[in-house]
Amino acid sequence: MTVAVYPGSFDPITNGHIDIITRAARIFDRLVVGVYAEPNKPVLFSLEERVEFARLSVAHLHNVEVEPFHGLTAEFARKMGIRVIVRGLRATGDFEKEFDMAMMHRQLDDKLEIFCMVASPEYQFLRSSLLKEIARLGGDVSAFVPARVAAALKQKNSKDRI
């Protein structure tokens, strides 16, 4: 049984993330979506909210589970008995960052394999930070995120404008 982890901050989860998850779920026997508790960037949503959005977004995928984690991805994978890390690549700019991360993961645990999936064309430009900015300025992001996430973004941003 091949188990993989798709780690990220998922702040918030986007349709691009869900596309990678759906495609990876067809390849691996089991996929764990690892929601990183302490990303090295400001987050809009709490860990609990990010986990809930992810769980709701992948509930239809029977071989996918969502787990929060702290610390190193390599350590999380080891504790879960996972040997494969799934990463998404949007455009050429992602490659160098992902390459560096892959080499570091291999240094931390030489049994880890990194599986990179190229984003589908309709999601090549999609970044959570860009969507948060659009939502903060009152724009409609409903085409890029699940409905519950779009509503949560709208609600959070309407509170900020009061």
Image (cartoon, rainbow, N blue to C red):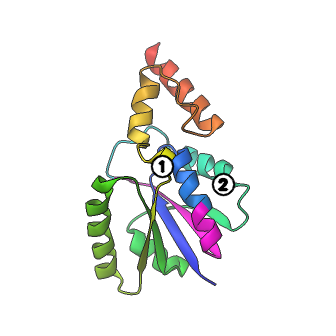
**Identity, as a three-letter code, of the amino acid under mark 2:** Val
Q: Which of these two is toward me, 89 or 13?
A: 89
Query: On the image, numbered disc 2 is attached to which residue?
Result: 58
Residue 30 forms part of the magenta stretch? yes
Residue 49 forms part of the magenta stretch? no
Classify residue 131 by image quadrant: top left
Query: On the image, numbered disc 1 is attached to which residue?
Result: 121
Q: Residues within 10 Å of mark 1 (few under 14, many from 20)?
A: few
Q: Which of these two is toward me, 24 or 136?
A: 24
Task: Identify the element where label 1 is drawn.
Answer: helix
**Identity, as a three-letter code, of the amino acid under mark 1:** Pro
Q: Residues within 10 Å of mark 2 (few under 14, many from 20)?
A: some
Q: Which mark is residue 80?
A: none
Q: CA distance from mark 2 to mark 1?
A: 21 Å
Task: Identify the element where label 2 is drawn.
Answer: helix
Q: Residue at x 59, y 62 (%)?
A: 23
Q: Residue furthest bottom?
A: 111
Where residue 56 sits: x, y (%)? 67, 48
Classify residue 70 by image quadrant: bottom left
Q: Residue at x 48, y 23 (%)?
A: 157
Q: Residue at x 60, y 51 (%)?
A: 54
Whether 23 is drawn above or below 160: the answer is below
| Image quarter (top left, top right, bottom left or bottom right) of the N terminus | bottom right
Q: Which of these two is toward me, 104 or 114?
A: 114
Q: Which residues are magenta?
A: 23-39
